[in-house]
Image (spheres, grey):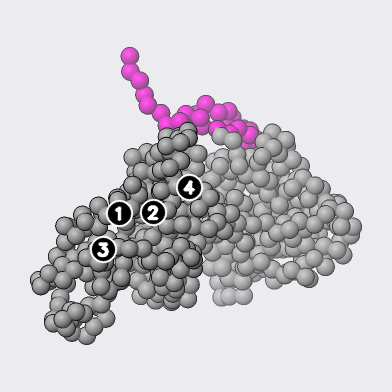
Amino acid sequence: MKFKTLNVDELANVMRDIRSDLTFMTTRTPKEAILVLVDSSSSMNETCYDSDDNMSRLDAVKQLFDNFATRSMAYNFHHVIGLVKFDSSVKTLHTFTETLETFKEHVHNLEANGCTVLYDALKRGMSQLKQVGEQFPDCRLRIICLTDGNDDGSMTEPDAVTTKLMSLNIVVDAIVVGKVDNNVLRGISNATGGCCFKPETSKAGLKLFEMETVLSLEMRKLKKKLDPSYIRSENILVALFANRGYDEKPEVALPSGLNDKVTGTENALKKKIQESKSGRFLEKDKRLLEELKSLHCDPHPFCTVLPSESDFTFWKILMQGPPDTPYEDGVFELYCQFGADYPVKPPLVRFVTPVYHCNINSVGRICHNIFDRSYNAHITMRDILDAVYGLLIVPEPQDPLDSILAEEYLTSRNKYEEEAKKNTEEVAGQSLDDMEKELLGEELPEKFIPSHLICPLTNKMFVDPVKNQEGTVYERKAIEKHLKRTWLGTDPKTNKLLTLTDLKPYQDMRKMARDYRKQQIQ
């Protein structure tokens, strides 16, 4: 008997009922349901942007939807998405599904004609999302409306549909194309806690759907919602927009752990080791303890790990930019969250400091296969730090999170690196010592460390020591930085000529430093 191995997701799609586009099936519990409303009225034939390309508004919407669908599939969100078009009437093109392959064809076949029953379309979207919410009570509900902002012919009153949207906790995001203003639609977005965007160029529109906080609500900090009873008339919706205006990008919801006080690895380990002797210790805790022990005794030369004092599963990480890259003069803050299913699933690692990089998005998400297809339970935190650090050395433009930056990297490498360097200077220019003092505060008083284990350039214990021909020992990154900044390249201690080839790894010193760190936590 022969057996065939099938991917679980592929099997689920094979077994589902695909006889009709109007079938709502899901292979996993959705975290967010998005109803996309596409305007196909006659006004969408008009020119979209103030540029020479003469792109119609409908073509612009098709382009925006393509980017939305492509990026959503790339992120593999736990989303279900439905599609509705509206002109003189409202028509469902596809009910909610996990797969977006057929959506593009539906949108590409749209032709502009008729008037614009925008508010009727919002009512239809609300009705369909309500059904999803009843089936999946914890699912976030959202409408994304792609339109030129005109309403013409709706039977539905905008204030009435707004109050119902608010009562159902449905967020409305609007992307307005063209030169028309509809303050009511923008008011609806604001009232429901959503955003209203008006990109002025094709590039700005595409950039919008590169943002994770536009593609998904998971990392977004929603605006404060009003009490539905406040929306008593259309005039109030208009006034809302007058006060708030257009949005450039949604606000990011950062984890609460970033506000926790952090501590050094030595203190965190001593506390956790003591706990392990007296109480119940889960396998996940044991693994975390081993990971932190490893990074304490043999630190990453460019990363400082600072665990939360109150939550051992939340770490801050300070990463120095790699030499000879646009990031070399920067220090970047990241966070690492270990979920309940670690190490079966990878930890969540994100940048807090903005990074100009095609594999890192605007909310710090990192695109690397070590967090996805290459991850397994044997991957260590050192492996993960090496992978993230390696991306700063060699970007992967063929697998980007930001396709616009990837294109810039491939076609205008000098411009990309200049912008990355400029961004680093602006947002990551604080020194490592200053950041450590800021985060650790009073915990930094110097502890006794044998002088032979301290680098004369950094006044810190060796991590990656090298020795010159005369036997003087330095921390590798410190002496390499010194030689790079001195014209002839001289030894800082003797002023004699010194080159990189004169420096050799000093394994004995590395072992002594490692052994001393082990003693610190015993």
Q: What is the C-alpha distance between the residues marked 2 and 1? A: 8 Å
Residue 323, quarter of picture: bottom left
Q: What is the C-alpha distance between the residues marked 2 and 4? A: 13 Å
Residue labelled with disc 4: 312
Q: Earlier in the sequence, mark 2 or mark 4?
A: 2
Q: Position of residue 317 (x, y in %)?
A: 43, 58
Secondary structure found at label 2 = helix
Inspect the image, locate mark 4, and give the three-letter code of the amino acid beneath it.
Phe
What residue lies at 63% left-to-right and 40% top-to-bottom?
A: 96
Q: What is the C-alpha distance between the residues marked 3 and 4? A: 29 Å
Q: What is the C-alpha distance between the residues marked 1 and 4? A: 20 Å
What residue lies at 82% left-to-right and 62% top-to-bottom?
A: 237
In this rendering, the answer to whether 462 lies above or below 94 is below
Q: Which mark, residue 450?
A: 3
Secondary structure found at label 1 = helix
Would you say the residues marked 3 and 2 are in contact, meaning their CB atoms lie under 8 Å apart?
no
Q: What is the C-alpha distance between the residues marked 3 and 2? A: 17 Å
Residue 452, quarter of picture: bottom left
Q: Residues within 10 Å of mark 3 (few under 14, many from 20)?
A: few
Would you say the residues marked 2 and 1 are in contact, meaning their CB atoms lie under 8 Å apart?
yes
Residue labelled with disc 2: 266
Q: Magenta stretch containing residue 25, yes or no?
A: yes
Number of the front mark, 2 or 4: 2
Secondary structure found at label 3 = loop
In this rendering, the answer to whether 499 lies above or below 300 is below
Q: Which mark, residue 453?
A: none
What residue lies at 43% left-to-right and 42% top-to-bottom?
A: 274
Highlighted range, magenta: 1-27
Inspect the image, locate mark 2, and give the three-letter code of the amino acid beneath it.
Glu
Residue labelled with disc 1: 517
Q: Earlier in the sequence, mark 3 or mark 2?
A: 2
